Amino acid sequence: MKEKLRVLVGLLPILLLLLADPTFSRRHSRRGTETLEEWQRHALEKIELLAREGGLPEEERKGITKFDKDVCYEKGCLDAALEFMTSVNFTVDPCKKETWMNFVCSRRVKGPDNINQVERLAKVADVQIQEILDGVLGAKELKDDFLFKEAQTYYHQCKNKADNDKEDVKNVLKFLSKCYGNWPILTGEDPGELFSWSNMVADINNIERYGFTPLIFKISMPNEFEGPHIVLSIGQTSFGTINSNDLKNFFQRVHKTAQLTEPYRHEQIEQMLYFQNSLNQVSISESPVEDLSLEKLQAKTDEFFAAENIEPSFNWVEFFQKVLSRTDIKVTQETKIKLPFQTVMNVLMQLDMSDPIALANVLNFQLASVLLQESTSLLDDMNAFKCTEETGPRETICLERTKQIFGYSLGKSFIKMTFNEAESRPFIEDLMSKIKQGYIDVISENEWMADTTKDFLKDKIKSMVTHIAQPNWLKEGGIESLKKFYEKLEASADKNSSYPINFLKVNSWMVDKKRAYAWDMSKRTDYKNYSFYDSEWSRYLGTVQAQYHKGINQVRIDAGIIQSPLFNLKAPGFMNYGGLGTVLGHEIGHSFDQQGRTFDKNGIEGEYWDPKSKAEYRKWVLDLAWKYGEEVHYITENLSNSIDPMKTIDDDIADVLGVHIGFLSYKEYLKALEADGKREKILPGMKSFAPQKLFYMKYANMWCDDKDIQDKYNDLLSDHSPGNTRATMPLLLSNEFAETFGCPKRS
Ligand SMILES: [Zn+2]
């Protein structure tokens, strides 16, 4: 149901350099000053140099560094001018399809930056949050933010795993003995009264980590609309590729690192392996899944145990209550459980017959090994553990986790640093309403659509809800709402605290939260009163994405994408309309793609169009697909490929509509400026470029790229057209574009 996530934006290194220069960003220019400040002169010199390189005619170039009362010298304008001057080759014809890319952005993508601006911004936004977490950015402003220190601590500890192996191993052992009694193989003692295999299995089920499956039983939650129930399946029955040598190695290392005095009982390793083997035997083929209430499950289990003469039976209510103890999910006799009953009984019987020492050894081993794998370097070189390790740089893994876990709290801090709530929100609301009006106008003027279908579509556009940067509950509820969301999280704010213990606490909170979320979703029957943010258990608000959800007719714009070079309050309108505006136009366009058009304003699927409009729409789509299908995509100079246009057509539709309607909205914006007695800002060196031209040039600059062979090849596998096609085709098909650039009319 979830609408595909749309990733959108990027930044020129040259802009980055300027942004990173504090004297440049701090001082805003005073418009209308007769003298240019030093930083402005500096930027203008750069602009002039770049303009010369791009072949801007001398008469347009020569005045760049001299003050001109018509020209805008604010930072937003100089940034925009720099962006164009870095990209544009002024010597070629913008009208020809073959030369448009060369005209609009060849110099940038073949020079300082080869990826599109959306992808670039995603990288920039990750650097921003990394710097925030590292305390390089916003240290003063954010220090008292809710859970800020906790997020920093988690990220820092995760990233710097293996910082203190000795302490971590000791802490893990201390934790295990405190909670679960003796670990026989290391202590030489029986597990003791504290040990309960079912409690331990319940706790192990609160761990979520890449490649990790709990031993013995695995608990999972239902999918949305499935109705509330708990799924119990057979968990891991053996340690996969871990053999007796690995186990020996493991215990030797733990023993040595923790400086234990008691020798470890290596003879117990054989028992551990024997235990695994027998568990494997009884669960190798699973019996059919049965759907039972807890009451019924208990009765059947008691019956089974009685028949086998085993005392006492197993208490299911206690077990599930333990698993879900920190959630609000109430486990009662009526709670539904789905499980392969017969196999589960075989496992229980096997556990009953097993040596508690072996059982305690394997469970302690699983819990300890996952914590040590996460927090120390102790197991890093062991092949058996490598296959359950997420690939990629540790920093990236930890950043993604931190973003997810602290999505709202850390997102709020990100917003504080990057989003101007008071001014940007009204601007984006106005932008959005202009785009929606653009859609309504285009629908009204459509020649082939019946009035009933027009009314249906207009109503849908009008009812579309937009979320900007954060959910309403957070915007209105502020810190109190955050406190409520993170109520049961016991994360440490102390960087010197024990990472494995902190990991366990944070991780189990996440698992609980996900379970409670899945439970609520399973109880739903539709998306009524559902907000975009209800589609995930947590959401990192700094993501560089704008999305449309056809199942609820809502648009979400995350704070990460409301940034330069896609959006900048101080930039001229064509930068914002050609940038973020066309992105939002694209998202709304998805309500009109082949799938999106079959949902009504409440997200209910059906056929709402009259047959004739539907037939005409189909013709329009096929014609568009045919045009996109004609495109030849060069991977290298000699190697080219075409792509199946039916794969990308929904996004192509959204692109074509997004640019067309973005442009109409921009014209409305210009009209509104004029009515206010204002006018669009003029960029240094670009006096001869009408703002309408710059709108299209900004749009194309956002998507164009010059990727390497592998990335180009990957782009052809995506359900979006490649960047350069996106930057060209919607314009090639547009009469407004042709008119703006004085090109021959498009057919
Ligand atoms: Zn899309």
Image (cartoon, rainbow, N blue to C red):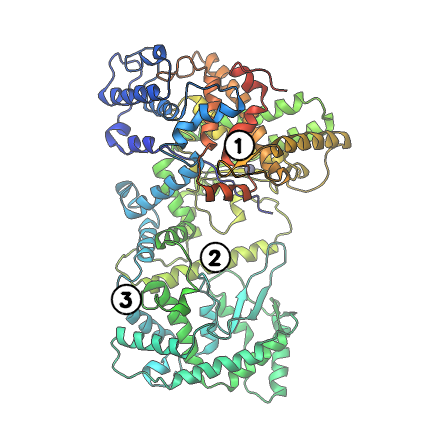
SS assignment at label 3: helix
Categorize mark 2 by other alpha carbons within 10 Å: few (<14), some (14-19), many (20+).
many
For mark 1, what is the residue?
726
Q: Where is residue 585 in the image (x, y as percent from the top left)?
A: 54, 30
486 on left or right of 223: left
Which circle's residue, 3 or 2, is located before the other in the chain?
3
Q: Does mark 3 have its CB less than 8 Å from ligand 1?
A: no
- The image quadrant where one finds the C terminus is top right
Q: Do the residues labelled 1 and 3 touch (CB within 8 Å)?
A: no
Disc 3 crowd, CA 10 A, few/some/many (<14, 14-19, 20+): some
Q: Residue at point 32% right, 31% down?
A: 14
Type of amino acid at the residue the image marks with label 2: Lys
- Label 1 or label 3, whichever comes before in sequence order: 3
Q: What element carries label 2?
A: helix
Vertical comparison of 343 with 730: above or below: below
Disc 1 versus disc 3: distance between alpha carbons? 50 Å
What is the x, y in percent for residue 51? 34, 20
Query: In the image, residue 735 lies at what x, y percent?
Result: 59, 19
**Residue bearing the label numbered 3:** 165
Give the number of the mark in front: 3 or 2: 3
Q: Which of 58 and 719 is in front in this view?
A: 58
Q: Which quarter is ligand 1 in? A: top right
Inspect the image, locate mark 3, and give the three-letter code of the amino acid beneath it.
Answer: Asp
Image coords of residue 186 (percent x, y): 33, 81
Say which amino acid is labelled 1: Arg
Residue 347 found in image quarter: bottom right
- In three-dimensional space, the C-alpha distance between marks 1 and 2, rounded to whole angstroms, equals 39 Å
Q: In this view, does 599 lie to the left or right of 484?
A: right
Query: Which residue is labeled 2 in the image?
Result: 513
- Decide if residue 617 is on the left or right side of residue 111: right
Q: Which residue is drawn at 31% across and 73% down?
A: 174
